[in-house]
Amino acid sequence: MFIDEIGDILKPLKFYYNTISTIIRNLKKRVFLEVFDKTFRYGPAITRQKYGNMFINELLVKYFGGLYR
């Protein structure tokens, strides 16, 4: 997806272009998005399953010190 396409999807939420660009830049920095070509077309860098696993592991470490049964 291109930034403009993402902007069209988020239009009901009334995000400004700069806000969307910042969100995308931060997701890219965190390795959740990747650039597919030089025209800045973005897509997911990880699967939903991998993201879910990362989220749960982070939650367990943060709240339970990584100790769980």
Image (cartoon, rainbow, N blue to C red):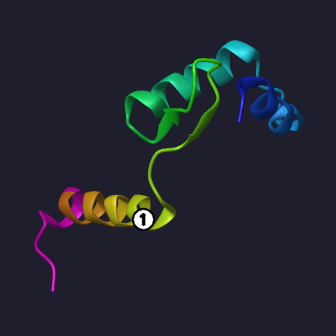
Q: In this figure, what is the number of numbered marks?
A: 1
Q: Taking 62 as reference, is 66 above or below it?
A: below
Front-lying residue, 1 or 32: 1
Residue that protrudes farthest toward the bottom in the picture: 69
Q: Residues within 10 Å of mark 1 (few under 14, many from 20)?
A: few
Front-lying residue, 63 or 40: 40
Q: Is the C terminus in the top left, top right, bottom left or bottom right quadrant?
A: bottom left
Q: Is the N terminus in the top left, top right, bottom left or bottom right quadrant?
A: top right
Q: Which residue is mark 1?
A: 52
Q: Whole-percent x and y of residue 61?
A: 18, 60
Q: Residue at x 47, y 59 (%)?
A: 47
Residue that protrudes farthest toward the top in the picture: 18
Q: Residue at x 46, y 45 (%)?
A: 45
Front-lying residue, 45 or 61: 45
Stretch in magenta:
62-69
Horizontal side of 64 relative to 3 (left or right) equals left
Horizontal side of 8 relative to 48 (left or right) equals right
Q: Whole-percent x and y of residue 62?
A: 22, 56
Q: Quadrant of residue 36?
A: top right
The prevailing secondary structure element of the residues shown in magenta is loop
Q: Taking 61 as reference, is 68 above or below it?
A: below
Horizontal side of 1 relative to 14 (left or right) equals left
- For the residue labelled by badge 1, is the local secondary structure a helix, a strand or a loop? helix
Q: Quadrant of residue 30?
A: top left
Magenta stretch contains residue 39: no
Residue that protrudes farthest toward the front in the picture: 37
Q: Residue at x 79, y 24 (%)?
A: 4
Horizontal side of 66 relative to 25 (left or right) equals left
Magenta stretch contains residue 66: yes
Task: Check disc 1 and give the amino acid type.
Answer: Gly
